[in-house]
């Protein structure tokens, strides 16, 4: 005997039920969460974008202002230098091939110039490179050079460049570093040397002037502490105005092109731009651009939000699970009691055998087949089938009240006995109704059980009992079950008759189409009769 699955999956049936009962509640919560998430995202994003744009513009403005300040510093330097070099004292000093007698006057002028620029050294050499004059600022700081190499090396290199220059041109060294010692304290110094050719009255080149610039002057006038200088050699120079000290790092950023930005982290980038001094572009001025903190906060908020959401979800799942187990137990108990009741009633009639299980399985198969018909698709749902499975077994519980003399009688019943027998439908209906009302039961399979109890002996043509309902007046579940009950009765052996074949049963059912049975149900039966046969 092949078994065709008719039993509903108890768990999934219950879960569907629970979800349906709480659907509105779940949807509202879900919509609120989604709505909150979207508004949080959009709202903060807009604020974030605006702040990010503002910060970006601010950084670029500071860089551009820093560039202007540096260019101005150097063009002022050049103008002052041109002025100083044109002074009569210096002119005649150069014209007389750096005549030593006049040194003191010249030295005074140049020292004055150095004081104004707060610079470090000024050296004059003749065309052979011999040092003719050395002027030091009174603010001169005692410096020590890395690897004991003084700036003499730098001077030597620059000398070659400078002697080849025309009037008004200036050669620049790279930026270089030295250490300043003041007692036990040491501080880093950042320097750069300028070299320019010197000319006498007749515009004849006679020597080279070197100026060792202390770049602290340049850093001090920068508008912002966050601006830093990236040298051609890859050093990154930061200056802390409060302490007045340099911090030299090698961050290794590839700042290419004339200007642009370089991503450092997800929240930080560097905006930068090359600086032009005289005709040269010796370094890059750069600044960290930080994205608004809002982005970080937002990220954290979203994690928090996600965690809360997960917590909420697990609470919901936990609550559904708890409800589910409690409900499952209750419903299983109800079903077990109902099935025991039905089995007890059936047990009084020893000839019916496994009638309850078979007719129930037929009913589910037949209803499932009928649900494939367009008109029944929306009526015969999965819930309908689940309910039918439990309700079908109740159909004859009313037989408990039928006296043994009638119920167990061998042979045909008299009319009076048959009238007595007919009462089982209303007895069953009443028992179920009273139970439902007394215990406020809401299980829809009990409701369906009541209908099947009451109407499984109604006929489509109105000649059935107890109410003589006609056609679709008979509840659908009762119309479906009536055929299954009859099919099993025809096939089963009774004390007064033999069991008939499947074909015979089919013929009888077809003959009773529109009479005993709903034509739609008969159609569905003919479509699935093989499945019914399979579980006989
Ligand atoms: Fe019955
Ligand atoms: Fe029956």
Image: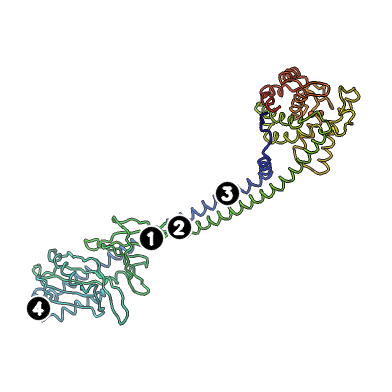
Tell me the residue at 22%/63% (across/down).
278
Q: Secondary structure at mark 2?
A: helix
Looking at marks 1 and 4 on the same chain, the residue that comes earlier in the sequence is marked by: 1
Say if 426 sits above or below 504 in the image.
Answer: below
Ligand 2 within 8 Å, label 2 CB: no
Taking the image as drawn, is residue 200 in sight? no
Residue farthest right in this picture: 416
Task: Please name which of the two marks, 2 or 3, marks the residue nearer to the observer.
Answer: 3
Q: Is 327 left or right of 167, judged from the image as shown?
A: right
Looking at marks 3 and 1 on the same chain, the residue that comes earlier in the sequence is marked by: 3
Residue neighbourhood size for the residue with mark 2, other residues' Cα within 10 Å, grouped as few (<14), some (14–19), many (≥20): some
Task: Please name which of the two marks, 1 or 4, marks the residue nearer to the observer.
Answer: 1
Residue assigned mark 2: 51
Ligand 2 within 8 Å, label 1 CB: no
Label disc, if present, on residue 522 of the rendered structure: none
Tell me the residue at 86%/22% (across/down).
411
Ligand 1 occupies quarter: top right
Q: Is 503 left or right of 263, judged from the image as shown?
A: right
Question: Between marks 2 and 4, how big is the CA–CA gap?
Answer: 64 Å
Q: Residue 36's spot in the image, x, y percent?
A: 57, 51
Residue neighbourhood size for the residue with mark 4, other residues' Cα within 10 Å, grouped as few (<14), some (14–19), many (≥20): few
Residues 520 and 331: in front is 331
Question: Between marks 1 and 2, how big is the CA–CA gap?
Answer: 12 Å
Label disc, if present, on residue 99 of the rendered structure: 4
Question: Between marks 3 and 4, how big is the CA–CA gap?
Answer: 88 Å
Kindly check if marks 3 and 1 are in contact, taking CB atoms under 8 A apart as contact: no
Taking the image as drawn, is residue 152 in sight? yes
Label disc, if present, on residue 35 of the rendered structure: 3
Q: Residue 93's spot in the image, x, y percent?
A: 11, 76
Say if 91 sits above or below 403 in the image.
Answer: below
Residue assigned mark 1: 59
């Amino acid at each position: 005997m092949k078994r065709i699955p008719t039993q509903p999956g108890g768990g999934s049936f219950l879960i569907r039920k629970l979800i349906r009962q709480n659907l509105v509640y779940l949807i509202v919560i879900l919509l609120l969460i989604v709505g909150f998430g979207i508004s949080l995202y959009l709202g903060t994003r807009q604020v974030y974008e605006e702040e990010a744009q503002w910060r970006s513009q601010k950084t670029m403005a500071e860089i551009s202002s820093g560039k202007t300040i540096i260019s101005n510093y150097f063009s002022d330097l050049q103008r002052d230098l041109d002025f100083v070099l044109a002074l009569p004292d210096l002119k005649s000093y150069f014209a007389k091939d750096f005549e030593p007698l006049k040194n003191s006057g010249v030295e005074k002028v140049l020292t004055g110039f150095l004081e104004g620029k707060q610079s470090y050294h000024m050296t004059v050499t003749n065309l052979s490179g011999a040092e003719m004059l050395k002027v030091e600022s009174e603010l001169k700081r005692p410096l020590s050079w890395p690897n004991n190499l003084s700036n003499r090396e730098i001077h030597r290199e620059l000398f070659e460049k400078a002697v080849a220059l025309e009037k008004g041109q200036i050669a620049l060294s790279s930026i270089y570093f030295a250490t300043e010692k003041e007692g036990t304290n040491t501080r880093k110094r950042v320097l750069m040397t300028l070299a320019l050719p010197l000319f006498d009255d007749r515009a004849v080149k006679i020597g080279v002037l070197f100026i060792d610039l202390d770049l602290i002057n340049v850093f001090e006038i920068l508008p912002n502490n966050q601006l830093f200088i990236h040298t051609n050699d890859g050093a990154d120079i930061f200056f802390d105005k409060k302490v007045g000290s340099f911090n030299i790092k090698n961050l290794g950023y590839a700042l290419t092109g004339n200007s642009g930005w370089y991503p450092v982290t997800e929240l930080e980038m560097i905006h930068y731009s090359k600086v032009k001094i005289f005709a040269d572009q010796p370094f890059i001025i750069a600044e960290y651009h930080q994205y608004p903190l809002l982005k970080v906060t937002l990220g954290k908020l979203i994690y928090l939000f996600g965690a809360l959401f997960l917590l909420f979800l697990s609470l919901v799942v936990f609550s559904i699970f708890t409800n589910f187990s409690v409900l499952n137990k209750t419903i299983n108990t109800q079903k077990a009691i109902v099935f025991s009741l039905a089995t007890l009633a059936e047990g009084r009639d020893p000839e019916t055998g496994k009638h309850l299980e078979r007719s129930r399985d037929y009913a589910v198969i037949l209803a499932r087949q009928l649900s494939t018909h367009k008109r029944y698709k929306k009526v015969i749902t999965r819930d309908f089938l689940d309910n039918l499975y439990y309700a079908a077994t109740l159909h004859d519980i009313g037989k408990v009240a039928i006296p043994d003399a009638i119920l167990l009688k061998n042979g045909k019943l008299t009319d009076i006995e048959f009238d007595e027998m007919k009462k089982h439908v209303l007895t069953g209906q009443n028992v179920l109704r009273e139970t439902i009302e007394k215990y406020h039961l809401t299980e829809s399979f009990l409701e369906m059980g009541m209908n099947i109890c009451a109407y499984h002996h109604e006929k489509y043509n109105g000649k059935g009992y107890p109410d003589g309902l006609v056609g679709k007046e008979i509840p659908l579940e009762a119309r479906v079950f009536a055929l299954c009950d009859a099919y099993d009765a025809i096939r089963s052996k009774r004390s007064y008759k033999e069991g008939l074949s499947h074909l015979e049963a089919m013929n009888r059912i077809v003959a009773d189409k529109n009479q005993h049975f709903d034509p739609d149900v008969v159609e569905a039966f003919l479509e699935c009769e093989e499945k019914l046969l399979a579980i006989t």
